[in-house]
Image (cartoon, grey):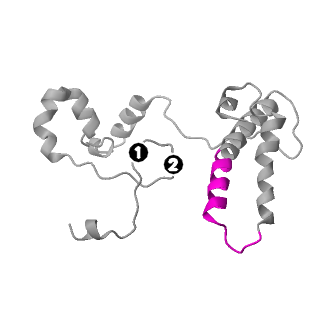
Amino acid sequence: MGDWCRFCKAKATCRARSDHNLALDGFTQTKPALLTPEEISDILSRSRDLVSWLKDLEGHSLTELLNGQEIPGWKAVAGRAIRAWTDQEAAFRKALELGTPEAMLYERKPISLAQLEKTLGKKGFEPLADFVTVPPGKPTLAPESDKRAAISNRADAVTDFA
């Protein structure tokens, strides 16, 4: 088992990967009422591949079902359908004929910051930099090897009184 497994053609049905991921049920034998930080770390590390493996297994299963293979207890079904125009311009012309005001058919909205920067170019966008703010991203869990700096909500006297 390793990072290379994600490139393997048999990643969804590999017995070694299955055994590795299903071994997580051994954590039910934990004696204390609360998990230790070490146990949490171990579970988080092992569960990352579990989630990936489950997605691989679902994709493989769907392909097999669509190819006529049976998987007991499972079936392929149509997902949520999204309505779409067959001819939007013709539909809008018809709506206008029926008396719908044009203002109700179109919305005017500003382009995004990224679109404006792309349109103006880096140099043309520079005068607008004072109007741009970059808030911190939503906290997310990452392995210790991640290059981003760690963040914490822990009280810190230096930060609190700076």
- Which quarter of the rendered picture does the N terminus lie within? top right
Q: Earlier in the sequence, mark 2 or mark 1?
A: 2
From the viewer's perspective, is residue 26 above or below residue 146? Answer: below
Q: Using residue 144 as the reference point, say whether residue 13 is left or right of it.
A: right
Residue 90 visible from this viewpoint: yes
Residue 148: which disc?
Answer: 1
Indicate the amino acid at tag 2.
Answer: Ala
x and y percentages locating residue 19 in the rendered image: 82, 43
* Residue found at x 48% / y 34%: 85
Give the residues in magenta: 31-48
For this orientation, the residue located farthest to the bottom is 33
Which quadrant of the structure image shows residue 110?
top left
The overriding secondary structure of the stretch rendered in magenta is: helix
> Between marks 2 and 1, how big is the CA–CA gap?
9 Å
Q: Say which of 143 and 67 sits in front.
A: 143
Is the C-beta separation of discs 2 and 1 under 8 Å? yes
* Residue found at x 13% / y 45%: 130
- Which quarter of the rendered picture does the C terminus lie within? bottom left
Which quadrant of the structure image shows residue 103?
top left
Indicate the amino acid at tag 1.
Answer: Arg
Q: Dot 1 lies on which element?
A: loop
Q: Which residue is mark 2?
A: 142
Q: Say which of 21 and 108 sits in front.
A: 21
Q: Say which of 51 and 146 sits in front.
A: 146
Tell me if residue 128 is in the magenta stretch.
no
Tell me if residue 45 is in the magenta stretch.
yes
From the viewer's perspective, is residue 32 above or below residue 108? Answer: below
Crowding around mark 2 (Cα neighbors within 10 Å: few <14, some 14 to 19, many 20+) is: few
